[in-house]
Image: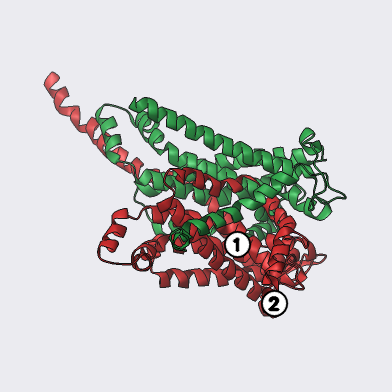
Amino acid sequence: MTATLAKEAPGPVEEPVLRKPPARKRLVPYWLLLPGIVWLLVFFALPMVYQASTSVQTGSLEKGFEVTWHFQTYWNAFQEYWPQFVRSLLYAGTATLLCLLLGYPLAYLIAFKAGRWRNLLLVLVIAPFFTSFLIRTLAWKTILADDSVVVDVLNALHFLDVTDWLGWTEGDRVLATPMAVVTGLTYNFLPFMILPLYTSLERIDGRLHEAAQDLYASPATTFRKVTFPLSMPGVVSGTLLTFIPASGDYVNAELLGSTDTKMVGNVIQSQFLRVLDYPTAAALSFILMAIVLGMVTVYIRRAGTEDLV
Amino acid sequence: MRWLRKNLVVIAGLLTLAYMILPNLVVMAFSFNRPKGRFNYSWQEFSLDAWKDPCGVADMCESLSLSLQLAAWATLGAVLLGTMIAFALVRYRFRARGAINSLIFLPMAMPEVVMAASLLTLFLNMGIELGFWTVLIAHIMFCLSFVVTAVKARVMSMDPRLEEAARDLYAGPAQTFLRVTLPIAAPGIAAGALLAFALSFDDFIITNFNAGSTVTFPMFVWGSAQRGTPVQINVIGTAMFVLAVLMVAAGQFITNRRKKTATA
């Protein structure tokens, strides 16, 4: 009796126990992914489809819009607003370059020279974030106002004569000129440059610097041949994190610029929220997306850090 | 001259830092201003009026509390969904991994205005009324990717043998997760939550498109840039800045003391 039980029991009992968990376990990742991925599909991917369809519609607010495959909208939008596109890329590109030039020394300072001040400096880099960026951007209106200290000093140094000649400023004032917009963009996105730069610099083994010096490399050569190449991942992600949001920004152009400094973001915003010309707005937004994604893809390929993504 | 060359990096770095801090100092100084007219852009005279009555402007504190609630819910949603995705990505093999990775990466590589506009076309086409819920949906969407990235980094560096050890010591799956996995992943989750809260609280562009007539704090500031900027805006900005710096300082102080008592 006991013998038969012992013989029979392991069979039917053990089999399902062994087989069932893997079957259930194979589904675990899908259950974990499901809610978040559905969220992204419905509220990120699906809107892109709707936007694509809106961009080829014609009609009016009163009569309603209909899909008519009117691709002409893209051409018309581009023809009318190409100056804003050029301006967006120019301003965002300049701001990115400035962020790199200004941010690198600070990231380098924090990573290698700060010593016990390191944490304090890091806090100071992040701290401005805690005041709403709109309030801080408005502060630039005060800093760059016509009779402010900064503008007076720039005037006394004849700096504004040079920028006037270059077309960056106009009539010795800074506010409501391209320079004000680029100053604001650079300011707003600097932390996004500094933090990735700092992360990749901090990982560099200090002994590599010593080794370079032992091999008679000057500080400049050490930087050019050792430090900078090793910080490339930080440079790439920093420039992306700066350029992408800057190219679509309309806050700085609106608050610090004039009608002559409108960027493509300003056009999309006013077409969508004020003019209510949805097809044109959707087409503009798609063109911007295509340009930015195209540039980012080429850039990542050229920089050779595809594993970044 | 040699001193200058030697310390060039330090000087350049500190100048950049000054450039980054300057607007905060201006915001702080102008919270004590008594402006003439509606705009608070030029210095007139010292006054404590705004500090004595921070909610003295119509609708400002309401918008502030709305933004805080919104950020709290958006953080909760994004952390829940994002942590689950991060665990799935690190711990399991499954199909379509590449596609899912790109779906998570793309929102971070997209100009905000494009996401804002496309989401608006979705809501318009579906006939959904714009307001608190549409903003919350949008905020969870764009915070999600950042949470996934933060949590993933932490879970990836985790030693799987710790969990095996827990199981060898007869901890059930639930117990292992709650008492081993979650505490180790906690710093990553906290970093993700902090990031999500900050992103949501300060978001303007996506909110501007999808809020309808709902006014968050950034929307209030934007509107006031057109109508007239009350000094109270600077009070709020300054208070948040000082509070955050104090909190970081306190955290630093506590960890320092812990370290000291641990070594002593």
* Residue at the (42%, 73%) spot, across then down: A302
Q: Is residue B153 left or right of residue B244?
A: left
**B161 lies above or below A246:** above
Element assignment for label 2 = loop
Q: Amino acid at mark 1?
A: Thr
Asked whether the beta carbons under mark 1 and mark 2 sit within 8 Å of each other, the answer is: no
Residue type (three-letter) at the residue carrying disc 2: Gly
Q: What residue appears at the point 34 percent right and 50 percent down from the top-left corner?
A: B93
Density class for disc 2 (Cα within 10 Å; few <14, some 14-19, many ≥20) is some
Closer to the camera, B194 or A285?
B194
- Residue displayed at 44% across by 57% down: A108
Give the Cα separation between the discs numbered 1 and 2: 18 Å
Tell me: A308 left or right of A267.
Answer: left
Whole-percent x and y of residue A89?
60, 72
Q: Residues within 10 Å of mark 1 (few under 14, many from 20)?
A: many
**Chain of residue at mark 2:** A
The quarter of the rendered structure image containing the N terminus of chain A is: top left
Q: Please, which residue is most extreme toward the left here? A: A3
Q: Is residue A192 left or right of residue A159?
A: left
| Chain shown in green | B
- Can you tell which mark lies on residue A186? 1
Q: Which shade of the palette goes to chain A?
A: red
Circle 1 chain: A
Q: Who comes first in sequence, dot 1 or dot 2?
A: 2
